[in-house]
Amino acid sequence: MTHLLNRFRRPRMGLLASLASLTSLWAATALAHKPSDSHLTLTPQNGGVVDVQWHVALRDLDDELTLDTNDDGRLSWGEVRTRWAEVSAWVRPHLRLSHAGQACVALPAQADDPPPALAQHTDGRYAVLRWRHQCPTSGADFNELSVDYRLFATTDPTHRGIVRWPSGVVVLGTSRPTHRMALSGLQGAMAASAASVSASMPASASTTNADAVDVAGEVADEAASTAKPESALDELLRFIVDGVHHIAIGTDHILFLLSLLLVSVWRREGPVRWWPPTAGWQPRETARASWAEVLKLVTSFTLAHSVTLGLATFGVLSPPSRWVESVIALSVLLAALDNLLPLLRAPRWAVVFGFGLIHGFGFAGVLQDLGLEPGNIALPLLGFNLGVELGQLALVAVVLPLALLLRRSAFYRHAVVVPLSIGIALLSAVWLVERAADVTLLGVGG
């Protein structure tokens, strides 16, 4: 009787764990790759005038204003254009500029103002809003500008504003909404400042007559409140932070690595067995063998994505982002399914190397959106790559010891590996369809 109860409980235990895993993974779908960012460029002019150019993601604006009126999962130019005044009126109050303690005032629209426009970033389309602020100088030198950034502050605490001005960049958000920009040394050189900003535009932005230019840049949060020349070490460190941050919020990359780590403490042996799921896996005898397997997998993945990250960043190769993101989703799907059934017959490290090449192009899209300066690519590339590796090692440090501890238990096989692998496979299948067909399923974005 006890034996029969145990047989009954085990499937139920696995089913409940599967449902819990699917729920948590589904909630993370919106974080599949990039977080909510906006790109704000401030260009000071003589007389206290500040040109504002702000790129805000349409998907974020849709969450606030319900722009997708026909609810088809896509935002057309017609839907956005008819709501442009509403978009502008909602966005503008979330940015406040001041000089010497006095508020700057947004200037009325002029006849020669640029028309409404959209810009294509690597993660979707953005509304481009442009206007001017007049700051009161009162005879004082216009040598500093204070920024107060509150976009999506009450609805999305993870949102970041990537703010660029002629002598630097800074990231603002709920944890740091204000910053004082030093403008010293710019008087008499304002005409050159616009050219300087344009020269630093990332190559990843595509523009047409209906699109604006993508002006984006990002740095780690700086302790100092005024801009100072950045040392090579500071630059390296901030791109390391960016790399770690991208892995932390890149759910597709995390789930790909997690799928690999779950079964790294096992090995397949004997004849190929397709049923029941995981039947062909046997626990590795020693922890050392598991660590050696993980070392091979991580090394393969690192070498592969480093190659394509470098090629894409230097402009040698630039495959379409939809193709890249679709294959990344496919890699997650296959890695998860291979945990359950023996789909991938090649050595696991070789499969990881092949998919790692594609993941590198995904990393490159993020790095290019950080606004690399022409002629200064090598150091950011090194820092970002190091940050990605640190993020991966952190995941290994959390998952592998637990997997080693539980690898011989039925609980690990039936309540951890099976439900997690099923959940990852289903979620990545949704991503694959969404990215390949450019659709949104069940209101969940990938």
Image: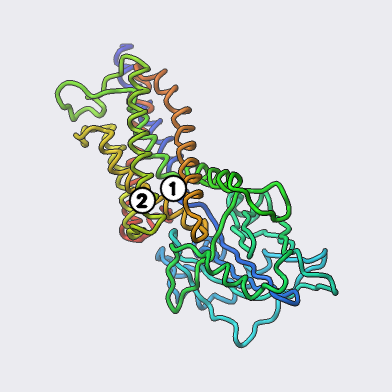
Q: Which residue is mark 1?
A: 29
Dots 2 and 1: beta carbons under 8 Å? yes
Question: As shown in the figure, which amino acid type bears the numbered disc 1?
Answer: Thr
Lower position in the chain sequence, tag 2 or tag 1: 1
Question: As shown in the figure, which amino acid type bears the numbered disc 2?
Answer: Trp
Which residue is located at x 66 percent, y 73 percent?
190
The residue sitting at the left extreme is: 271
Question: For residue 137, which numbered disc appears in the image?
Answer: none
Can residue 154 be seen by looking at this rendering? no
> Helix or strand or loop: what does disc 2 sit on?
helix
Left or right: residue 237 compared with residue 391: right
Q: Which residue is mark 2?
A: 431
Left or right: residue 361 compared with residue 44: left
Residue placed most toward the observer, 407 or 239: 239
* Screen quadrant of the N terminus: top left
Q: Quadrant of residue 445?
A: bottom left
> Helix or strand or loop: what does disc 1 sit on?
helix
Which residue is located at x 67 percent, y 75 percent?
132
* In the image, residue 107 above or below residue 95: below
